[in-house]
Image: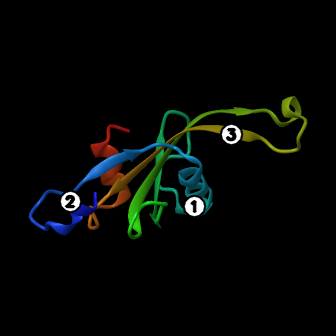
């Protein structure tokens, strides 16, 4: 990635990240009001953050995506609130001008 970023005439990059512990930790830091898109089943929501993961020389733009897969009733879990289950994805990109929703459409999510 670093060599690609140093050459300005190359196209922007977009890579899918593995959901490692550090990526999940960064995902957990995203505020609830930062998510864009429909908060319903089969609809993707996206949010973005500046993240520097171990092995990276600097912060990069990361776009997180989640899709609601369902909710478990509170009493079935033995807790007082409903818990939601999401399908998750994370992408790192050099694109800076496009909003996160454009990246989600480019990724097919």
How far apart are the two marked residues, 3 and 1, measured between alpha carbons?
A: 16 Å
Decide which of tag 3 and tag 2 comes sooner along the chain: 2
| Comparing labels 2 and 1, the label whose residue is closer to the camera | 2
Left or right of 6 on screen, residue 50: right
| Residue at disc 2, secondary structure | helix
Q: Report which quarter residue 78 is drawn in.
A: top right
How far apart are the two marked residues, 2 and 1, measured between alpha carbons?
A: 27 Å
Q: Residue furthest front?
A: 55
- Say if mark 3 contacts mark 2, CB within 8 Å: no
Identify the mark at residue 91; answer none if there is no mark.
none
Q: Is residue 52 above or below residue 27?
A: below
Q: Which residue is mark 3?
A: 84
Q: Which residue is mark 2?
A: 4
- Residue displayed at 62% across by 56% down: 28
- Image position, residue 30 (x, y; %): 57, 61
- Say if mark 3 contacts mark 1, CB within 8 Å: no
Q: Is residue 46 visible?
A: yes
- Image position, residue 70 (x, y; %): 64, 32
Q: Residue furthest left?
A: 9
Identify the mark at residue 30; answer none if there is no mark.
1
Label 3 Cα neighbours within 10 Å, binned few <14 / some 14-19 / many ≥20: few
Q: Is residue 29 above or below residue 46?
A: below
Left or right of 41 on screen, residue 73: right
| Residue at disc 1, secondary structure | loop
Q: Indicate the quadrant containing the N terminus: top left, top right, bottom left or bottom right.
A: bottom left
How far apart are the two marked residues, 3 and 2, measured between alpha carbons?
A: 38 Å
């Amino acid at each position: 990635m670093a060599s690609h970023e140093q050459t300005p005439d190359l196209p922007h990059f977009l890579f899918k990240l593995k959901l490692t512990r550090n990526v999940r930790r960064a995902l957990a830091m995203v505020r609830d009001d930062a998510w864009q898109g429909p908060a319903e089943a089969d609809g993707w929501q996206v949010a973005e953050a500046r993240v520097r993961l171990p092995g990276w020389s600097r912060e990069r733009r990361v776009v997180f995506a989640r899709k609601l897969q369902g909710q478990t009733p509170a009493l079935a879990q033995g807790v007082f609130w409903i818990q939601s289950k999401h399908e998750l994805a994370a992408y790192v990109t050099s694109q800076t001008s496009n909003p996160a929703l454009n990246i989600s459409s480019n990724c097919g999510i």
